[in-house]
């Protein structure tokens, strides 16, 4: 079964992203979600806007050159957020600043982020940005496929030994992000990509689509079981996929030990903030200590921008250069020098941490978890011990063709997708169709106007620039324009109207200008001349309850005073 009613292309989804709406970007494995996100990031940077790039896991974050959402938001491994936690995050110079300065938040692999964690990030953004809008008014771009691996619920320290509750509704940490109120508050536009760039034969696509839709027939299963591995027919260079780490380590250690010759050891080097270096090390598919020999089966762990290899390209080490750089011969017969590569965490054009390692890992075997995002020409897959919804689908969909699939084992769980997702997926597809129709019906000048307004609201250049990361100068320019209008006697609605910005954005400008000392409480007090009694009452409450965060003051007035008024009052508060 193919879903021909969904026809959104990458270009159409990119045009929707450019308008600044909140987006859930989804689609089948191989539909190009990560590629499209990279195109959007490139577009933003070309206009002088640096998005916050995050992911639900370290591995996914490393793939896209970002950090985990847990680290970016300051939530870490907490199960709940207290008022003390919110104050600590807001007062943290680095964490608080990057959340305040952000305009766009991208979260990759959203299927693996629980509803609880998603809601906590929303709460942090609202508090730090002093806004009651979802995620503090950021454009939020969620990327992922809920048919793939579900939220992480750990009973052990091993991320590949995740065990779901017998009834997942018993554990709120296992609920999907779309089940949270934070998801609903975002008013997401769904972009369901329909193009396929990985699988290359119709028969295999038919099986994967049937598995995804919960409509596998006996004929589909028969064709899968026909790929049962006959050991003397398996090419030696083919990678094995297992659900568990223990099986992977056992196979790789055994095979490396069977090779003759000297061991070449490559140790990862790191620089920057220690805790972020550790995050990069955990997320990097290349190990901290890589041991290779001639004849080792390896896999590249990073995309090469010159097109020499991609994450998932496999081959064999055939030698070492004089400077000890491994030479890899791919399955296609191409020889590549695997020179060291860098993985970085960057925020606002500043590199906070980086690690350098040869972009290889032993690849006689890898886990299904670590294969997510890869494209493999062939794989030996053992799903006899699959224990989680989506594991079988993720593993099978890594392979390009049915002829490249070799099955060692298959249990019933491997052929199951989460029952709740089947129903939700139909909603996502319908929502994507509606969005596609809506944006196709727009006049080009209307969508261009939306794009221009969004770039302007983010403080970016109207014309694309090739100057890397010119964001900091831009923000000073946009604040200076607001300052000039304040000095000219304009009020907030007038400034917002003349600059085609929201009043909330102008209020953020005022907070930045006050922080820098460019405006005084008297300048702001003029904007509140008609509300002096109310402001005095707010200041009395602030002396008792504090000003960071504002929620205790908001609650004190039973929600009768808006956050915008409280923020203005805080700008004139002098303790």
Image (cartoon, helix red, strand yellow):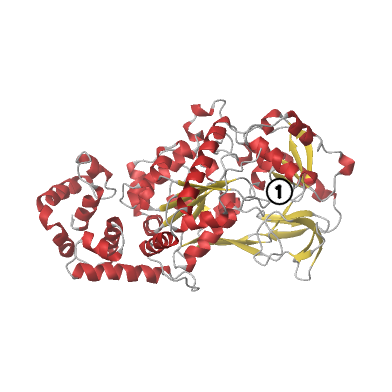
Looking at the figure, which quarter contains the C terminus?
A: bottom left
Camera sees residue 245: no
How far from the left and from the top, in percent, is residue 335?
Answer: 79, 65
Determine whether 24 is above or below 268 in the image.
above
What residue is disc 1 on? Answer: 199
- Comparing 31 with 467, the one in front is 31
The residue depicted at 37 percent of the width and 58 percent of the height is 97
Image position of 166 (left or right of 257): left
Residue 35 falls in which quadrant of the image?
bottom right
The residue depicted at 27 percent of the width and 58 percent of the height is 507
Looking at the figure, which quarter contains the N terminus?
A: top right
Image position of 399 (left or right of 143): right
How far from the left and from the top, in percent, is residue 268?
Answer: 64, 59
How far from the left and from the top, in percent, is residue 183?
Answer: 43, 41
Image position of 317 (left or right of 76): right
How crowded is the residue under tag 1: few (<14 C-alpha within 10 Å), some, or many (20+)?
A: many
The residue depicted at 65 percent of the width and 55 percent of the height is 288
How many marks the image carries: the answer is: 1
The residue depicted at 78 percent of the width and 69 percent of the height is 321
How far from the left and from the top, in percent, is residue 198?
Answer: 69, 51
Which secondary structure, mark 1?
loop
Camera sees residue 26: yes
């Amino acid at each position: 079964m193919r879903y021909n009613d969904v026809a959104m292309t990458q270009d159409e989804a990119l045009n929707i992203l450019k308008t600044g709406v909140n987006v859930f970007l989804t689609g089948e494995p191989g539909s190009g979600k990560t590629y499209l996100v990279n195109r959007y990031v490139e577009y933003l940077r070309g206009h002088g806007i640096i998005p916050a790039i995050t992911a639900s896991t370290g591995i996914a974050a490393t793939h896209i050159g970002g950090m985990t959402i847990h680290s970016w938001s300051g939530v870490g491994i907490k199960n709940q957020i207290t008022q003390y936690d919110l104050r600590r995050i807001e007062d943290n110079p680095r964490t608080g600043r990057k959340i305040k300065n952000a305009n766009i938040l991208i979260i990759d692999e959203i299927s693996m982020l629980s509803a609880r964690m998603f809601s906590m990030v929303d709460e942090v953004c609202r508090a730090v940005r002093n806004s009651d809008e979802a995620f503090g008014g950021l454009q939020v771009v969620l990327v992922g496929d809920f048919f793939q691996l579900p939220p992480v619920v750990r009973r052990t320290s091993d991320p590949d030994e995740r065990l779901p509750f017998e009834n997942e509704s018993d554990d709120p940490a296992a609920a999907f992000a779309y089940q949270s109120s934070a998801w609903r508050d975002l008013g997401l536009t769904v972009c369901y990509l329909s193009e396929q760039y990985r699988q290359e034969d119709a028969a295999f696509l038919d099986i994967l689509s049937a598995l995804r839709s919960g409509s596998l027939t006996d004929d589909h299963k028969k064709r899968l079981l026909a790929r049962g591995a006959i050991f003397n027919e398996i090419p030696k260079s083919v990678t094995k996929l297992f659900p568990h780490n223990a099986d992977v380590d056992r196979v790789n250690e055994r095979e490396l030990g069977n090779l003759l010759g000297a061991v070449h050891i490559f140790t990862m080097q790191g620089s920057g903030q220690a805790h972020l270096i550790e995050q990069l090390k955990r997320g990097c598919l290349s190990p901290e200590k890589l041991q290779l020999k001639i004849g080792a089966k390896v896999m590249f762990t990073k995309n090469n921008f010159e097109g020499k290899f991609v994450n998932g390209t496999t081959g064999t080490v055939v030698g070492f250069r004089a400077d000890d750089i491994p030479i890899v011969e791919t399955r296609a017969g191409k020889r590549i020098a695997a020179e060291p590569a860098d993985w970085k965490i960057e925020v606002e054009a500043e590199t906070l941490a980086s690690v350098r390692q040869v972009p290889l890992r032993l690849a006689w075997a890898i886990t299904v978890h670590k294969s997510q995002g890869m494209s493999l020409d062939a794989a030996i897959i053992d799903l006899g011990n699959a224990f989680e919804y989506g594991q079988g689908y993720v593993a099978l969909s890594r392979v390009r063709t049915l002829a490249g699939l070799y099955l060692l084992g298959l249990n019933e769980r491997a052929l199951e997708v989460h029952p709740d997702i089947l129903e939700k997926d139909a909603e996502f597809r319908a929502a994507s169709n509606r969005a596609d129709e809506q944006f196709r019906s727009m006049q080009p000048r209307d969508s261009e106007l939306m794009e221009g307004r969004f770039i302007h609201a983010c403080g970016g250049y109207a014309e694309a620039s090739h100057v890397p990361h010119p964001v900091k100068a831009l923000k000073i320019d946009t604040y200076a324009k607001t300052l000039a209008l304040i000095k000219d006697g304009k009020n907030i609605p007038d400034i917002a109207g003349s600059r085609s910005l929201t009043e909330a954005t102008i209020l953020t400008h005022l907070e930045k200008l006050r922080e820098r000392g460019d405006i005084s409480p008297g300048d702001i007090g003029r904007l509140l001349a008609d509300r002096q009694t109310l402001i005095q009452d707010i200041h009395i409450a602030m002396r008792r309850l504090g000003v960071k965060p504002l929620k205790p003051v908001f609650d004190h007035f039973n929600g009768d005073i808006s956050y915008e008024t409280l923020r203005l009052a805080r700008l004139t508060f002098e303790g």
